[in-house]
Amino acid sequence: MKNVIINEKDSVGVCLDGTDKIPAGHKYALKDIKQGDYVIKYGEIIGRATQDIAEGEWVHTHNVKSHLDENVAYRYEFNANSFPKTTATFQGFKREKGRAGIRNEIYIIPTVGCVNNACMRLAKDAQKLVSGSIDGIFALTHQFGCSQLGEDNENIKKLLCSIALNPNASFVLFVGLGCENNGMDGIKEYLAPYGRNNIEFFNCQDVEDEHAYGMAILEKFAQKAKDLKREAVDFSELCIGLKCGGSDGYSGLTANPLVGKITDRMVSLGGSAILTEVPEMFGAEQLLMNKCESEEVFEKYKAMIEAFKDYYIKQGFPVYENPSPGNKKGGITTLEEKSLGCIEKAGTSKIVDVLAYGEQVKKVGVSALNAPGNDLIASTALAASGCQIVLFTTGRGTPFSTFVPTMKISSNTRLANHKNNWIDFNAYDMDEDGLFGVLLNTVNGEIKCKSEDVREIAFYKTGVTL
C-alpha cells in the first residue's frame, strides 16, 4: 500500500493508491485508536473516534465524528514567515487608475436581472467588435437587483461596482431598467470616489432603442480597447485569488500545499493573494489567526469568524454542516480535516489585512476575505476584491469560471487525465516551478485557462426577497 504520513504527530496516514478495503485518498490508522480518542492529521485534531479503530483499519465517517467547539476561545500567538523581497514583472495592461489587468476585456453589467436578455443581445452582437488586443466582450448576468432588502440590496450594489473596478476590465457598460431597487444613481454614487472614466451607464426605459444605444457605446469602447498594448508591470500590481472546490483526500497533500508555495512566492516577489471560504476555515481558524501580522488584524479576523458562526447559529444550523457528499467520497471525513487542508493554499506568509465582502484589496501580501465557501459565490467575491486570476484547486473537478480567468489545478492524476478539458495543471507531483510557469504564462496572456470562454457571477445573499 503506497501511503503518506503528513506529520510525525499523526495517528492516521493516507492511502494513495487504494486497496480492497481502503479507497484511494482515504485514511487508515497508524496505531490502535480507542473510542473517544482524538484522531490526528496534519499534526492537528480532525475529530474523535466513535468506536475502537485497529491499526491499519479504514478511518472515515463510520468511525470518526467532528470535534468542533462552537464556543472556542481564540488567542493570538504570531507564527508566520516574512520573506526577503525581490523584484519581478509581468506583462499587463496598465490602467489610468488602479492596478494593471492581465486581460483586455469589456464588461456589460446589468443592474437588475430584468435586463439580462438585453445585455446578452448586446454581448452577442458585439462579438464582431473583438479585434486587436481585445480578449473578449462579456455580459455578466445575474437574477438580482430588485426586491432585495437591507444588507442584500447594499451588497448587490457593492459587488457589481467592485466587479466594474476589476483591473481586467478596460471598459464597462452598466445597463439598468430604470425602476429597480439597485438603481443607477446608487451605482454612480458608489463609483464616484474612484474617478474612473472607463465606465458608462444607461437605463433601458430612458432610451428609445436600448440595443442601438448600447451598441454605439460598445463600438466606442472597442475602438479604444483594440489598440491597448501589454507592458512590463511590477508584481506589486498582481493579486491572485485562492479557492478550492470539490476537494478530496489528496487536496490537502498536493494541490493546496503547492498553491501555498505559489502564494509565498508571490509575496516574496511583492505580489498579493486573497484567501476566503470562511466556513471552511472552521477547525483551522486559530492557525490563520496566528499568522495575522498584528493584534489589530487578529481582532478583525476573529470578528469575521465569530460573525459567520453567529450567522450559522441564528439560522439554526451547526457550524460543522460540512463536508459535502463529494468531499466524503473523496476521503475527507470532518470539517476540521477539510479546513486544515483548505488553508494550506495561504502558504506560510503572514496575513496583512481582513476584507469585507465586496471590499477592494488594499495591502500587498496575503489578505483574508469575508465570503462563504460556495465555489461561484466565493470566486466572484475574490475577483470583485481585485484578483485578476483565481487559482482553483480541485480533487473532483468542475467546469465553471467566474468573470476572471479561473485556473483549475487538480489534486490527483486520475482527474487530470479524465477531465483534461477542465484541468489546467496537475499538482500531484508538486512541481512548483511548473505551476508558477503556467501561472506566469497565463498572466502574460501567452495561454488561457481552459474555462475562459465561461463568465459567471453569483452573490452572497442572506436575507428576504420580496
Image: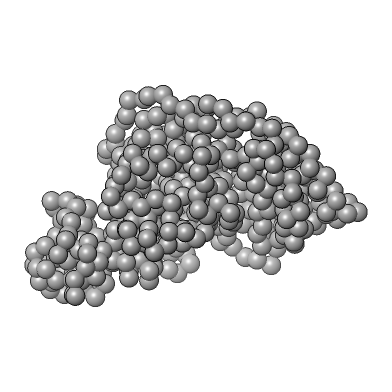
Residue located 36% across and 30% down the image? 268
Residue located 30% across and 44% down the image? 431
In the foreground, 290 or 458: 458
- Asked where in the image residue 266 lies, by quadrant, the reply is top left
Residue located 59% across and 62% down the image? 463
Task: Tally the marks.
Answer: 0
In the foreground, 261 or 77: 261
Residue 185 is at least partly visible in this image? no
Colour theme: one colour
In the foreground, 239 or 406: 406
Farthest right residue in view: 208
**Residue 354 in the image: x percent, y percent?**
45, 41
Residue located 29% across and 36% down the image? 80
In the picture, the quarter occupied by the C terminus is bottom right
The relative height of residue 425 versus residue 348 in the rendered view (above or below) is: below
In the picture, the quarter occupied by the N terminus is bottom left
In the foreground, 48 or 121: 121
**Residue 48 in the image: x percent, y percent?**
20, 66
The relative height of residue 181 versus residue 77 in the rendered view (above or below) is: below
Q: Is residue 208 left or right of residue 67?
A: right
**Residue 237 in the image: x percent, y percent?**
51, 31
**Residue 343 in the image: x percent, y percent?**
34, 49
